[in-house]
Image: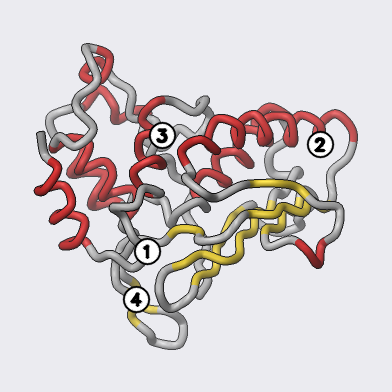
Amino acid sequence: MKRTALLVSFVCMMSAAWSQGQPSVNDSSFRAVYKAAALHPGYSSRNGIVYDSVIRRWDKNIVIYVIGGAGKEKRAILGKLKNTISLLSPSLSKISISFTDEMRSANYLIDLDYKGRSHWYITWDALGNIYKGNIYLNPRQIFNADQQASLVSHYFYQTLGYFVFNRKDRDELLKGDPSIASNIFVWRHDINDLDLRILKLHYSDDIKPGMAEKDVDQYFDKHTN
């Protein structure tokens, strides 16, 4: 079960409305943001299998192996990624993230010298548990080391779930708040409180792999303040 994600950002939602005082974690605004990010729309695979929109997340520790890259560019990428991981880790419940020098012991591959289009993908089981992750970076497409570092960190965040906005959900969220329209595709940003809130809920005991939209709605209905 593999799928290449579009280069989109679902976490740059900071606007005047948020800065006036963050809403309660389970209010209607956060519900919409979380569902759009975490519930990837159903789709048909190349084999004609239709997958529903369900929660997917890791159920085991993530062990990263990095290939390719050199010099200051590689140091910048890994430095940014490690800083990102340190910010994300407290929101991941029992999941730990580490690096290894042995490919055979890794379940997450980062290729910093990929020849094709930069992308990420994840592999999951029938229950929605992610057990493998991959990031492929083509440094010839993105020459700036800072941008390379930001893109890898952004991709890594997305692979912690099947985090992606589809166009329909994006358009719905933009209604009534055009101030965020120019930021919706921006992937160069630091981890913010909204990122962490999405991730913390996603890895909480109340959210389970395989949950459908109706199950997520039931959770929010039960916990609405």
Lower sequence index among marks 4 and 1: 4
Image coloring type: secondary structure
* Residue position for label 2: 74
* Residue position for label 3: 195
**Most extreme residue toward the top, as rendered?**
20
Q: Amino acid at mark 4?
A: Tyr
- Of the numbered discs in the image, which one, if any, rests on residue 40? none
Query: How much space separates mark 3 and mark 2, taking CA atoms?
Result: 25 Å
The answer, for residue 47, to whether it is visible in the render is yes
Q: Position of residue 56 (x, y in %)?
A: 41, 61
Q: Position of residue 20 (x, y in %)?
A: 22, 12
Lower sequence index among marks 3 and 2: 2
- Horizontally, is 18 left or right of 143 in the view? left
Q: Residues within 10 Å of mark 1 (few under 14, many from 20)?
A: many
Is residue 154 positioned above or below 221 on the image?
A: above
Query: How much space separates mark 2 and mark 1, taking CA atoms?
Result: 34 Å
The answer, for residue 174, to whether it is visible in the render is no
Please name which of the two marks, 3 or 2, marks the residue nearer to the observer.
3
Query: How much space separates mark 1 and mark 3, taking CA atoms?
Result: 19 Å
- Of the numbered discs in the image, which one, if any, rests on residue 209? 1
Q: Are the residues tagged 1 and 3 within 8 Å (C-beta)?
A: no
Lower sequence index among marks 4 and 2: 4
- Horizontally, is 166 left or right of 91 in the view? left
Lower sequence index among marks 1 and 3: 3
